[in-house]
Each structure stands twice: as structure tokens, then as C-alpha cells.
Image (tube, rainbow, N blue to C red):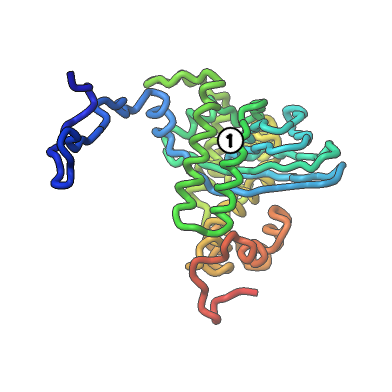
Amino acid sequence: MRHVNEISAPASSGSTAGHPGSLRTAQYSIPILRDSLSEFIASWGFEPVGFGYWSQTRKPSVLKDNLLSQFMLILMAKGECELTCPGGNYLLCGYDCVIIPPYLMYTAVCISDEPVEYYYLGYQIMNQELRNQYSHLDSITSIQHLPGLLDKAAIQRLQHVYRTSQASEDGRFLQIQSLLYSILIPMFCRQGSTPSLALPIRCKSSEEQLVLSCMELADQKIQDGLQVADLCRMLHVSQSYLYRSFSHILHCPPRTWLRTFRIEKSLTFLKSSQYTIEQAAEKTGFSSIYHYSRVFKEVMGCSPSQYRRDLPGGQTKKLPPDKQQS
């Protein structure tokens, strides 16, 4: 009786009698179908916008003190640090993962004797319709701490993908996006977020609705250089109510959020060699290159030109000499 996954092939001219040529091949395979969790995560359109590495060898030392406009994953490789935000303090150890929502001021401080190493991965949601729903699964007002989400294999993959991104190898974007998905899948599994065609959405408070409306307006009219007074006028609210809403929801005043939002938006133009620094400032609503450079340094800790020089692998295309900025 012939074995089920053996297919006989005609004997070759070099075959000897009694030893017919044969070809073995697998007759059965597991069909690759889209499962509900994969469909659920793919529908959001998660896209990485930044990937980096940080290390510190002494304590106490402030590792980061930031306010960002995108979601941020902090992926601890080793050591211990304390993360402080308006919602509380978190002790982070090796293999921990932390999700930091947009516009939440946080500070990370090294507290261990051994070196602290972590990777950070910023991401955004491209599906505009689902972005607000995600804010209810992954709260926009508090940090999520997932102890021990990573393992040794995950850290090794982080190291490999980081080296690839630093070397500006082709395909690095898809590698980073795949890395993001490999972290989001166990995250959703641990949180017990069951995919559903109709996600339950709680009613937003009036303050939440106001903050979201400000975000939409600032995004739509980014080039107009909107100020806090403009937002109040367009949304028919007082500055005191707007201030109170931002303080309750995002734990920062609207002016701080607005300037950080515009600087973060400008990074997209700085990463492209098609735009000068003046054009990046103009497209994000800054009245002059001097104002833009001053606010940029306050938010990012360096000048726009220094940020552009420090991009991994440099720019893909050099600007003409007459358009380069010092």
C-alpha cells in the first residue's frame, strides 16, 4: 500500500531497477484564513510614525519628559525606571510594555543601578472613522501598563529591526509595521478586547466632545495657524471652559497642546527632502522661521536643522544648495 503523501514519479534514465524515482510532497496544509482578531486589528490601519532606542547608565536621571501627538509604546529591554504622569506612577521593569496615549505629559526616570534600555515605537491610526472608537479601548486619558508582555525573542526582534532601520535598509517600514502588529496582538489578547462588528461606545462628556472638536479643527486648518482664541470663537465657548476641558481630559492647557500638535505635524515635512524648513513652518501655521525654530526647540529639545541632520540614514534626497537651511 502506497503512503498517502507519497507521489510516484517516472523513473529517471539513471535509475536502477527496483529503485524508481519518487517525489515526496505534503498532501495536507492548514488553510490560512482571516480570523476575527486579525480582521479587527487590520481594520484600524495602525501605522508606525517613529521608532527609537534609549539607554541610560546612571541614576537618578530623567530619561524622557515629553508630550506627544501620537500613541507611544515603551518597550523595556532591561533595568528599571519610574514613569510619572497625571494618572499616577508606574514602576517599569525588563520585558514590560507601556502604552502612552496622545497629549499626555509623562516623565521617565532611571532608578536602578543597572543600565536601563528601552525601545519606543510611535504609531497612529489611519482609519479616521475608527480612531475615536480606539480611544475608548485604549483610553486617551491614562497610561496602560502591561507587565511582562515581552519575552527574550521579542527583545531580539526589536534589536534586529532597530539595526535595520538605522541602516536605512529597504523594507524597513514594513518590518517596523510588522513589529507593531506583533505587539498589538498579544496586547489585545491580554486585555480581553473581543472583536465585534458593533463596538460598544460610551457617550462622551461635553468636555470630551469639545476636546475632540478642537483636534479636528486644528488638523483641518493646520496651515491657518489657529490660536486658542480662534478655537473658542469657532466652537462658541469661553477660554476658561476650554482650559478646564483640556486640563480634565488631556492634563495640559490648550496652548501647550496646540503648539505641540503643530510641531509634531511639522515633523512629517522635515522628514521629506521635498520641503525646506521654512516650508515646514509655513505648512503648520507658523508666522516665521524664527518663531517656528523657537517653539520647535522648546518642544523637541533641538533645532529643526539638528533634528533633520539626526534622522536615521539622513535624507533620501538632498536639497538644492540654494534651498538648504542652516
The quadrant of the image that shows the C terminus is bottom right
Q: Residues within 10 Å of mark 1 (few under 14, many from 20)?
A: few
Please state, as top left, top right, bottom left or bottom right, where the N terminus lies in the image.
Answer: top left
Q: Secondary structure at mark 1?
A: helix
Tell me: residue 210, above or below residue 277.
above
Quarter of image, res 116: top right
Count of picture labels: 1
Question: Is any atom of residue 166 visible in this view?
Answer: yes
Where residue 221 appears, as percent x and y from the top left, is 50, 51
Residue 93 image-quadrant placement: top right
Q: Position of residue 190 (x, y in %)?
A: 56, 21
What amino acid is at disc 1?
Ala
Q: Nearer the viewer, residue 144 or 247?
A: 144
Does residue 226 appear anywhere in the picture? no
Residue drawn at (70%, 41%), measured in percent from left and top?
Answer: 253
Q: Is residue 243 left or right of residue 153?
A: right
- Please give the name of the residue rendered at 57% of the width and 65% of the height, measured from the top-left corner: 314
Q: Residue furthest front?
A: 17
Find residue 145 and report its image quarter.
top right
Residue nearer the viewer, 190 or 129: 190
In this picture, residue 27 sits left or right of residue 73? left
Q: Position of residue 44 (x, y in %)?
A: 43, 34
Identify which residue, 42 or 197, lies in the foreground.
Answer: 42
Image height of 323 relative to 270, above or below: below
Up-down relation of residue 202 to residue 253 (above or below): above
Residue marked by disc 1: 153
Where residue 149 sits in the image (x, y, percent)?
61, 28
Q: Residue furthest bottom?
A: 322
At 50% from the left and 20% from the top, the residue drawn is 193
The residue positioned 26% from the left and 25% from the top of the image is 28
